[in-house]
Amino acid sequence: MTKQRLRKQELVTLVFQLFWEEAHRLGRSTIQSLVIPLDRVRRELADRTGAPRQNSKWIYTQIRKYEEREGVVLFGKTRDDDGDEALKVTEDLLTFVQKRHLHRAEKIRLANGVADFIESEIAVDGRIATLFLGAGTTVAHIAEVLQSRAADSTLRLDVTTHNMGVIEVLARPNRAGESIRLSIVPGRFDPITYTILPDEPEPMCEWEFDLVVQGASAVYDGRVYIESDEELARKRTVLHECNGLKLLVLTLHEFFTDLPQEMRDFGALDDFDVIVVPKVKRPLENQERGLSYLHSVDSTFRAAVTGWHYEIFTRTAAPIAHSLPISHRA
């Protein structure tokens, strides 16, 4: 393998990948209880990049520099059972900037699924499609995919959002500028959720979109939850008052076995018309739980699109007007 220079962001991505591989090996649904020796990280990085790393201290220093640059904490130093220096994932992965490093592969797969859905079912006949893109890192990935596609296609979108991640993506100078019109919901900036939130609840019953896209932090007993009390009012308002087809994006890590503690209920799965999830070769326990539910006879959703990288489920009573169902689309 050819040697390559490893950038800090690539290093962090590889380290997260090691933690998820360890979770798969142990059958865990989370990486936050795991510990990986720094020397093992060093060896794995050398094998995967073809470039030997100086020492474990260099790795930890590069991670710390990245965290300082991004203004977040992702990892901590500890010791394993043998007393060797090791890494662990921080227990407090709460902010948008932290969460954007989690489940990146799954988020990219389902972001492409949402983009395919928009192109085949929403932005049809060359007309401008109106979208509301909600909070969350997965939705920001959707904006990335839509922007890249609009630059080389006839896709035309009118996007409204309060997600700063989406705003940053769509505000970049690029060839898609004339294809995607961006409107920003007014309010104050919340650095935890990385959203613009109102000081007072605002009526949105007159807001109408072709598609409203949202995410969730947890799913339990058919209900959907988020962590932020600050965001709760807007989350509920967007789901229950905005007019339009409602789409939920899930990485499948959200399916809890117990009632989520210190989380806020903002609605039900059945409040959504469409659910998009990634295809997972080796699903973890909570992902398997989510897939089992969506495919079960108790679910009100049916698999409408089965692609190589994602699945799209539609509620049986959902007003899908165009070409669904489709099967085996890549």
Image (cartoon, helix red, strand yellow):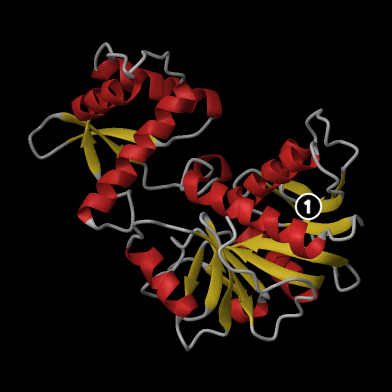
* Circle 1 SS class: strand
- The residue that appears at 46% across and 45% down in the rendered structure is 102
Q: Position of residue 190 (x, y in %)?
A: 67, 47
Q: Position of residue 43 (x, y in %)?
A: 22, 24
User: Is 148 located above or below residue 160 in the figure?
Assistant: above
The residue where tag 1 is placed is: 161
For residue 48, above or below residue 317: above
Write the residue at 33% across / 46% down.
20
- Of all residues, the one furthest to the front in this rendering is 328
What is the x, y in percent for residue 109? 55, 51
Q: Nearer the viewer, residue 308 or 269?
A: 308
- The answer to whether one can see residue 185 in this image is no
Judged left or right of residue 234, residue 62 is left
Q: Could you classify mark 1 by the number of other residues whose Cα lies within 10 Å: few (under 14), some (14-19), or many (20 or more)?
A: many
Horizontally, residue 54 falls left or right of residue 281, namely left
Q: Residue at x 66, y 79 (%)?
A: 271
* Number of numbered discs on residues: 1
Q: Residue furthest left?
A: 82
Quadrant, the C terminus: bottom right
Question: Which of the two residues, 124 or 298, is positioned nearer the viewer here?
Answer: 124
Measuring 78% from the left and 72% from the top, which residue is drawn there?
Answer: 322
Q: Quadrant of residue 96?
A: top right
Mark yes or no: residue 72 visible. yes
